[in-house]
Image: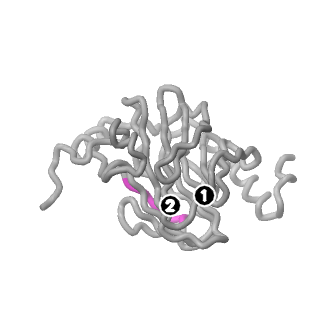
Amino acid sequence: MRSRLLPDEDSRQSYELARAFERQYPYGSIDTQLTSEQQTQIREKGVDAWEFVVNLDVNAMLQSKTEVLFMGGENCVQTNLPLPKANSVYYFEVKLVEKPADVNMWIGLATKPYPAWRMTGWNKYSAGYCVNNGSVHQNSPFKGAHIGEQLFVGDILGIGYQPRSGVVWFSRNGRRFKAVLSGMLYDLFPTISADGPCSFSANFGQRGFVFIEANVKRWGFGPVEGSIAPPP
């Protein structure tokens, strides 16, 4: 059994529970495509339609729609809406606001539902970048590849997604890494996880990106303003 490769009993138990979760909720068991109601919401609100959701079994707190405080333990949060698929590229950035050195944090994309205690990239239909060492995992806790650099508080990780090819790529403080991940042809949600207390702030295009090309080519999730003007 591959679980024997894991370092301790807690890790092995987490792995086996996650495998059982995958069997119970295979991809497609829940319809996660954008509904007509959600598309109307996007037209009305623009990029503000996207926000993180903190479920009851997650030890975290929403500080705003795009800012989350993890309060300890292994936890994972996802957005309410998936990435759109109409354009050739979509992009978002995540800033590390607070993170002790001994807390591991993973940022990336995953399908729904995703096990709330697992790191992004460790389970099927997910890809995650570990900010502690610059490694990425795709669909497995065992298969990591070092493609980038460690991030520190104040740094910004960017995630690019090309829905027509299923390619995912990353940037750090506005500089794109060359390596890419492929095969991610799913309904994907921004997904962020950590194994201890930390906080982050996400930018889906509601303000300018650090990665200049994403601004020029308008790779954000939607228009800054929707059809309904925000309150004065």
Disc 1 marks a residue whose amino acid type is: Val
The magenta span reads 51-58
> On the image, which quarter does residue 66 sit in?
bottom left
Question: Which structural element holds mark 1?
Answer: loop
Q: Residue at x 60, y 40 (%)?
A: 125
Task: State whether residue 3 appears in this view.
Answer: yes
Report the front residue among 123 and 212. 212
Q: Tell me the residue that label 2 is attached to.
A: 155
Q: Residue at x 26, y 42 (%)?
A: 223
Residue 215 circle label: none
Q: Is residue 128 above or below residue 54?
A: above
Q: Residue at x 48, y 57 (%)?
A: 156
Disc 2 marks a residue whose amino acid type is: Asp
The C terminus lies in which quarter of the figure?
bottom left
From the viewer's perspective, is the residue at label 1 or at label 2 nearer? 2
Q: Is residue 123 left or right of residue 167?
A: right
Looking at marks 1 and 2 on the same chain, the residue that comes earlier in the sequence is marked by 1
> On the image, which quarter does residue 75 sit in?
bottom right
* Dot 1 and dot 2 residues touching (CB under 8 Å): yes
Task: State whether residue 60 appears in this view.
Answer: no
Q: Give the distance between the C-alpha atoms of the residues marked 1 and 2, in whole angstroms.
A: 10 Å
Which percent across, then down, holds residue 18?
69, 51
How many discs mark residues in the rendered view?
A: 2
Q: Tell me the residue that label 1 is attached to.
A: 131
Q: Is residue 103 left or right of residue 232?
A: right
- Residue reaching furthest left? 232
* Label 1 CA crowd tier, 10 Å (few <14, some 14–19, many 20+): many
